[in-house]
């Protein structure tokens, strides 16, 4: 039996990551087609420049009879969006999913795209959780910050369709940016909309700029650059990310926790050093476990 080790998800504990063990596959290298202004992946050289489909990875996976000794969940993806625009043409993510589903692996999808609905047939064949990032319902905000991503209404509709089809769905309100998408009324409307769309778990995280973010922002929007630079000047660098002051992070996470729990969803923060406020696992793994448990009972 030939064995190939699927890539493990790795994140330094110094960055306050609380994710459980899992595998991780990035189907694409280069700059993601969603072009999010706040993207942290650009700190890694492999995720800059032209988008490059990893067809060789697919072929490697297809040649192997056994993909891993332990069937941990496989996440797609941490540094790129598996359903970015080029996926409509290449269908690379779908082809990788076919191999993983055939191998019996639980799947964790993390995306900003409604294209994931295309693969409902595959996701229904295994234990899968789909988490879509919805930073705001304000399309002016999202078109500026996430210019290549589908608008929020399309993501919300995708969550509804996935949930209706029986796929456990979560949402990430990530990143939360001071003065832009952190107003209480806007957050309440967003959380209420997520709950009514079938979302069962919400993970939140504040903006943690990487080096080069403020330089880019200064070129695009000088007023916003000065506002955010002033706020972040009171924060500190942690493992290559600029964190907001702790008092702000604690306040906004507690506010969202109260909203999310009030609508009956589970809650987690991501890399905030506030795991004490979590009611479930940040990456959606908890929904897989609950699904498996309910199936066992049946």
Image: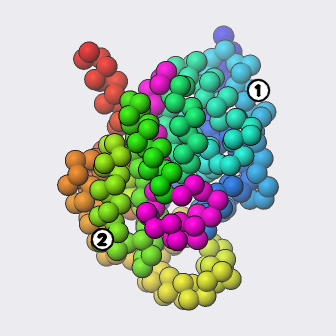
- Pinpoint residue 31: horizontal percent, then vertical percent: 71, 57
Q: Residue at x 45, y 46 (%)?
A: 157
Q: Is residue 271 visible?
A: no
Asked if residue 136 lies left or right of residue 39, the reply is left
Residue at x 27% of width, y 47% of height = 265
**Label ID, residue 59:** 1
Rendered-image quadrant of the N terminus: top right
Quadrant position of the C terminus in the picture: top left
Disc marking residue 185? 2
How are the colours assigned in the image? Answer: rainbow
State the SS at label 1: helix
Range covered by the magenta-colored residues: 124-151
Q: Does 142 lie within the magenta span?
A: yes
Relative height, residue 195 to residue 285 (above, below) = below
Q: Is residue 256 magenta?
A: no
Q: Residues within 10 Å of mark 2 (few under 14, many from 20)?
A: few
The residue shown at (69%, 55%) is 33
* In the rendered image, the vertical position of residue 144 relative to residue 224, given as above or below: above
- Work out whether residue 141 or residue 47 is closer to the camera in this orientation and state it: 141
CA neighbours of label 1 inside 10 A, class few (<14), some (14 to 19), many (20+): few
Number of marks drawn: 2
């Amino acid at each position: 039996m030939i064995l190939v080790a699927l890539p493990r998800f790795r994140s330094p504990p110094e960055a306050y990551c609380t994710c459980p063990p899992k595998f991780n596959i990035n189907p694409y290298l280069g700059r993601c087609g969603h072009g999010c202004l706040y993207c942290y992946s650009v700190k890694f050289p492999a995720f800059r420049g032209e988008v490059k489909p990893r067809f060789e990875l697919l072929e490697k996976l297809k040649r192997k009879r056994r993909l891993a000794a332990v069937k941990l969940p496989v996440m797609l993806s941490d540094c790129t969006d598996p359903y970015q625009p080029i996926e409509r043409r290449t269908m690379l993510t779908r082809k990788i999913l076919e191999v993983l589903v055939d191998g019996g692996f639980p799947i964790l999808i993390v995306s900003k795209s409604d294209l994931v609905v295309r693969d409902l047939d595959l996701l229904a064949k295994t234990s899968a959780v789909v988490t879509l990032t919805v930073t705001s319902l304000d399309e002016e905000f999202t078109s500026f910050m996430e210019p290549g991503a589908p608008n929020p209404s399309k993501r919300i509709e995708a969550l509804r369709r996935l949930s209706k089809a029986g796929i456990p769905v979560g949402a990430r309100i990530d990143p939360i940016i001071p003065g832009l998408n952190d107003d209480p009324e806007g957050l309440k409307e967003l959380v209420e909309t997520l709950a009514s769309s079938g979302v069962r778990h919400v993970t939140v995280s504040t903006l943690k700029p990487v080096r080069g973010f403020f330089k880019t922002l200064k070129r695009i929007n000088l007023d916003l650059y000065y506002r955010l630079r002033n706020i972040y000047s009171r924060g500190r660098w942690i493992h290559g990310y600029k964190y907001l002051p702790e008092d702000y992070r604690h306040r906004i996470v507690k506010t969202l926790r109260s909203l999310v729990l009030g609508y009956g969803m589970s809650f987690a923060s991501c890399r905030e050093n506030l795991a004490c406020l979590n009611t479930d696992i940040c990456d959606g793994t908890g929904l897989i476990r609950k699904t498996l448990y309910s199936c066992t009972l049946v």
